[in-house]
Image (cartoon, rainbow, N blue to C red):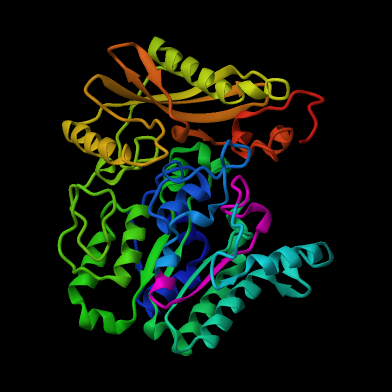
């Protein structure tokens, strides 16, 4: 959910969180990639998916995600009890198109409960298990953990998606329950020693609103907030002051990971180092920080100014042609089942001209990224490059894509990174012939008639 959707749909719990508990919201929080894994991996590991060992289903040498540097492992090494929970096992953040966890990831794992419980969902009312709303079971699980480990340090991570995954509007039904959940945690005293985070992974990716400029921005700016025990302000006043300043600064999931590590090894509340991709929010984020400083490519940056182009310009047509060719290359080895996509029409085109500071920041980011083992091409900038963003519809299937590509003016060729291609309408059952074996290709595949389901 976007921050704006949270404001619109969860007014009571948000008011309680801000006014009663003294929560702090990040107003400039910007995602760094597409979908839930791209939102959570930087928070929970400190890395992009392509910087980590291959874990996607159907890919050579892929393996489960157990070996990723999960942040809760750091907390475990400091004596913390850990818990991990998701409520939709079939669409798990690291199980749907990745191989998931082979071993239990934390001391407590709610996935096992939902795998067993989902067999009974068809016999229950919508979104319920028996007569109990499933989101209440989710909340109660965490309350039970708090009550069980009253004297232990704890790291709990819960990701609830059922009430907002396909449509944000149903989330309104849990507003009061979320408020009461927060109230119970507060009155029980559990929040006296807890850094509480309320967050979302991203804004709506496929709704009718996503086709608007407002929807595009909201996808990139999800809700993220913190609540500290009141005593923290007395002991570390500058830390809280920095957090308040940072609510108006550009922040990313990488910063959240750095902040979590700082909970374990607090290094002070000075000025953040802008040369680093990740800055702890306990330090002041420099005011002039840009997306390039923060490792956010132009495709995902909500802070850029784009100049509108004529959809019939030669450069626009060339950009779209190159992009469609790249998309088709992803499904080339599956051409017996996936149709060759063709351009139907172009819906919009814009151009971004970076500043000199952007080039300098991007050069430093390039050097940093190239140190990782699983490096893949991203949209780097240099003085011979121009950045374009095109939106178009393909056929068959009416797939709607939004793509940021880079023109190398010295060669006239476009660079298209897979991480900068967004499918902005649902592909539904169009990719059923491939989605089980190669779910990462779902956005790009339109199954030929008779291809069946793999």
Q: Residue at the spot x=18%, y=69% of the render? A: 268
Q: Residue at the spot x=34%, y=19% of the render? A: 407
Instruction: Say how many tags the image has.
Output: 0
Where 160 sits versus 440, above or below? below
Give coordinates of residue 39: x percent, y percent. 46, 51
Q: Which residues are magenta?
A: 75-99
Q: Residue at the spot x=32%, y=71% of the render? A: 263
Give coordinates of residue 276: x percent, y percent. 23, 49
Q: Is residue 132 magenta?
A: no
Residue 375 visible in the snapshot: yes
Q: Residue furthest right?
A: 123
Residue 148 left/right relative to 219: right
Where 104 sits versus 445, above or below? below
Where 389 sits versus 147, above or below? above
The quadrant of the rendering that contains the C terminus is top right
Residue 2 left/right relative to 262: right
Give coordinates of residue 164: x percent, y percent. 59, 57
Q: Residue furthest front?
A: 61
Q: Is residue 86 magenta?
A: yes
């Amino acid at each position: 959910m976007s921050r704006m959707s949270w404001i619109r749909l969860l007014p009571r719990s948000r008011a309680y969180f801000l006014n009663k508990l003294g929560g702090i919201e990040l107003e400039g929080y910007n995602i760094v990639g597409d979908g839930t894994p791209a939102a959570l991996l930087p928070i929970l590991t400190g890395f992009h998916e392509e910087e980590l060992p291959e874990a996607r289903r159907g890919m050579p040498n892929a393996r489960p995600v157990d070996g990723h540097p999960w942040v809760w492992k750091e907390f475990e090494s400091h004596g913390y009890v850990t818990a991990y929970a998701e409520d939709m096992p079939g669409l798990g953040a690291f199980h749907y198109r990745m191989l998931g966890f082979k071993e239990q990831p934390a001391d407590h794992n709610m996935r096992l409960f939902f795998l067993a419980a989902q067999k009974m969902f068809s016999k229950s009312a919508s979104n319920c298990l028996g007569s109990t709303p499933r989101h209440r079971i989710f909340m109660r699980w965490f309350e039970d953990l708090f009550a069980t480990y009253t004297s232990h340090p704890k790291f709990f991570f819960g990701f609830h998606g059922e009430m907002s995954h396909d449509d944000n509007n149903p989330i309104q039904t849990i507003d009061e329950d979320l408020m009461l959940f927060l109230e119970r945690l507060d009155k029980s005293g559990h929040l006296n020693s807890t850094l509480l985070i309320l967050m979302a992974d991203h804004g709506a990716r496929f709704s009718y609103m996503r086709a608007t400029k407002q929807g595009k921005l909201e996808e990139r700016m999800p809700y993220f907030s913190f609540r500290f025990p009141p005593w923290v302000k007395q002991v570390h006043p500058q830390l809280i002051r920095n957090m308040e300043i940072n609510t108006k600064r550009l922040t990313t999931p990488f910063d959240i990971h750095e902040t979590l590590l700082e909970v374990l090894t607090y290094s002070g509340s000075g000025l953040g180092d802008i040369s680093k991709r990740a800055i702890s929010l306990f330090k002041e984020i420099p005011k002039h920080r840009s997306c390039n400083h923060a490792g956010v490519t132009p495709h995902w940056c909500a802070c850029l100014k784009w100049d509108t182009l004529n959809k019939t310009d030669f450069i626009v047509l060339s950009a779209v042609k190159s992009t469609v060719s790249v998309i088709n290359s992803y499904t080339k080895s599956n051409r017996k089942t996936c149709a060759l996509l063709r351009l139907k029409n172009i819906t919009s085109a814009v151009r971004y001209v970076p500043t000199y500071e952007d080039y300098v920041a991007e050069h430093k980011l390039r050097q940093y990224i190239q140190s990782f083992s699983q490096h893949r091409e991203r949209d780097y900038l240099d003085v011979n490059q121009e950045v374009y963003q095109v939106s178009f519809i393909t056929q068959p299937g009416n797939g709607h894509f939004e793509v940021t590509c880079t023109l190398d003016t010295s060669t006239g060729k476009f660079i298209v990174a897979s991480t900068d291609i967004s499918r902005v309408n649902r592909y539904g059952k169009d990719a059923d012939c491939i989605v089980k074996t190669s779910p990462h290709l779902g956005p790009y595949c339109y199954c030929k008639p008779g291809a069946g389901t793999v």
